[in-house]
Image: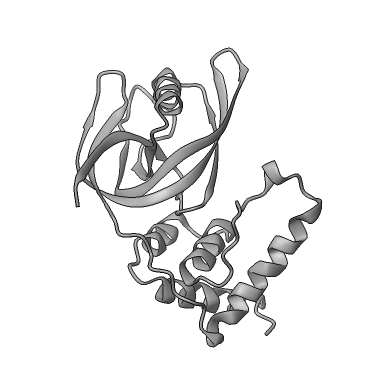
Amino acid sequence: MATLTFPLFPLGTVLFPDGVLPLQIFEVRYLDMVGKCIASGSPFGVVLLTEGHEVRTPEGQERFHPAGTLASVHDSTMSAPGLMQVSCRGGARFRILASERRPNGLWMAETKLVEDDHPVPVPSELQGAADALDRVLASLDEVPEQRWPVLPPFRLDDCGWVANRWCDLLPLPNDQKYRLLMLDNPVIRLELLHDMLDEHGLITS
């Protein structure tokens, strides 16, 4: 698979494929990055911080996990001069081959994409996780769509999609989310989420 080079946005969160990521951007390096991504229709990479902060500080430098998820901006507003609100959607996963921090503090990375989850029907023994997610989605009827934590189309019959949406919704530690993100097998990912939901009494069928 060919290598791709794109800017990185190290954050204290994990983005999953098809996940929703709202951002408030005010640093010049990221305002410039996002503006160029919007103009060109190109994505940037979201990586989970292991050291440092989302906002640049004089005393520290960001360090991050060696893999992440592409993010594409699907809505943006400039709510005030120098303050941009954007909503992004998660795309493909990637692994970093090499990265470099530019003088303005922006990270660029050479990467290889990770193969997307293959569509796998939800097996009967894990259907409870899909049913519980269906109930959550049904509860969104009275919430404006722009505030939904899950974007359509809803694929409640697909293991990877159901597992990823529970990873978005559950308050799991970020390191645990990162491990789930990088699991190759979507069925195993859903099995782990199903067990967590069952332990908390959220599986009713």
Residue in the image at 19% along x and 47% along y: 2
Looking at the rendering, which quadrant does residue 178 occupy? bottom left
Position of residue 30 relative to residue 204, above or below, is: above
Residue in the image at 39% along x and 21% along y: 29
Residue lying farthest to the top in this orientation: 81
Position of residue 167 relative to residue 186, above or below, is: above
The image's colour scheme reads: one colour
- Residue 9 x, y percent position in the rendering: 39, 35
In-front residue for pair 111/48: 111
The number of numbered badges drawn on the structure is: 0
Residue in the image at 41% along x and 71% along y: 186
Judge left or right: residue 149 versus residue 189.
right
Looking at the rendering, which quadrant does residue 97 occupy? top left
Judge left or right: residue 20 versus residue 90.
right
- Residue 146 x, y percent position in the rendering: 68, 41
- Residue 31 x, y percent position in the rendering: 45, 21
Judge left or right: residue 105 versus residue 191.
left
Query: Which quarter of the rendered picture does the C terminus lie within?
Result: bottom right
Residue in the image at 69% along x and 82% along y: 204
Residue lying farthest to the right in this orientation: 142
In-front residue for pair 64/133: 133
